[in-house]
Amino acid sequence: MLRLSLDAINTIDTIVRTGSFSAAAEQLHRVPSTISYTVSKLEEQMGITLFERNGPQVKLTLLGQALLEEGRCLLTAAHHLESRLYKMSQGVEIELNIALDALLPISILNSKLEEFIQSPYNTRLHFKHEVMMGAWEALVQQRADLIIAAGLGPSGGGYKTYPVGSLSFVFCVAPNHPLAQQSQPLSKHQLLAHTAIVISDSAKHLPLRTTGLYDGQKQITVSTLADKIALQKAGIGHGFLPRICVETALKQGQLIEISVMEPKPDEIFYLAWRTGENGQALNWWRDKLAYQWLSEGIKFDV
């Protein structure tokens, strides 16, 4: 049986903050004898002295200071737990899982994250990047509560969507890549002669999606956008990249923009959540992104 209770820790904390047993009793709405008994009983059970008594004034011993230092952490944790449980009973989630398409940097959410930190919700946020159908799969399999995904989702329903923005692409190669020396716009035949760098779809069960590839084209597949950009900077291959992600590399000459006969159209992104989900933190993000972004006509790379 635990001898150290949260009530005992709170009593000791109150004594220290108020300066005396009698003042602590007044603040805790107890009689002074109850405060004295609580401390004496704890000292007896634990075999330590918590306070040095000097008349009405008391001072923590070194052991008492150590107990209170750790004990205040326990009190704080208990208060947070009570708060989370209460908020759960009011429909506020303990945590929220948000999946972003790998083409979108998390920086697009910076302003919303700053707002959320100031909100009354203490919901823990977990972010993860998924590729193409991977975000939709995370939503359907309940690994994500909210997603920002490219393209349309799988058939079968079970979720709601809002278009929230678009992303433009640029065909890029390194300055030393053979395609950089050829006449533009580049044709399909010219592209087929060189290796494309492709990000693999992270979905495991839904039909996979590929974009910007020709049948029979040589390709190297990577799992992240950062790896794709790195290989294209190294001159190993070519491909379309989100302009927002390579603007600096283009300005610095690490990549150059190439005109092609079949450019990649802007990608439309959708915010989606499961039908029937109605947590307060989820609703906050849904309203901020679905309605506010849509009303602003967000173009992610502007």
Image (cartoon, grey):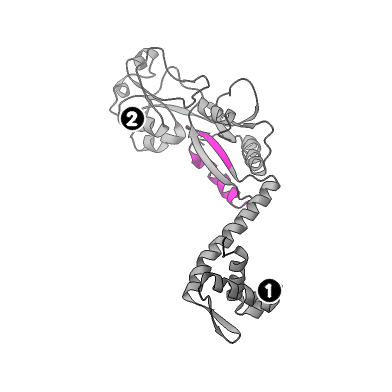
Question: Along the horizontal axis of the image, is 56 left or right of 242?
Answer: right
Q: Label 1 is placed on what type of residue?
A: Gln
Q: Residue at x 35, y 38 (%)?
A: 252
Q: Nearer the viewer, residue 196 or 191?
A: 196
Disc 1 crowd, CA 10 A, few/some/many (<14, 14-19, 20+): few
Q: Would residue 114 be counted in the magenta stretch?
A: yes
The label nearer to you, 2 versus 1, is 1
Instruction: Please identify the residue farthest to the bottom as the structure is shown.
Output: 55
Position above or below: 185 against 109: above
Position above or below: 162 against 81: above
- The picture places residue 69, in percent across and down from the top left corner, at 51, 67
- The picture places residue 173, in percent across and down from the top left corner, at 35, 27
Q: Secondary structure at mark 1?
A: helix
Q: Residue at x 56, y 39 (%)?
A: 97
Label annotation for residue 231: 2
Q: Quadrant of the N terminus?
A: bottom right
- The mark total stands at 2
Disc 2 crowd, CA 10 A, few/some/many (<14, 14-19, 20+): some
Q: Nearer the viewer, residue 230 or 119?
A: 119
Q: Secondary structure at mark 2?
A: helix
- The picture places residue 302, in percent across and down from the top left corner, at 52, 36
| First to last magenta residue range | 96-119
Is residue 292 at all visible to an observer of this figure? Answer: yes
Is residue 17 at all visible to an observer of this figure? Answer: no
- The picture places residue 9, in percent across and down from the top left corner, at 58, 67
Mark earlier in primary sequence (2, 1): 1
Q: Nearer the viewer, residue 264 or 149?
A: 149
Q: Residue at x 33, y 24 (%)?
A: 237
Position above or below: 292 against 183: below
Cα–Cα gap, marks 2 and 1 = 66 Å
Quickly name the residue at label 1: 27
Q: Would residue 251 be counted in the magenta stretch?
A: no
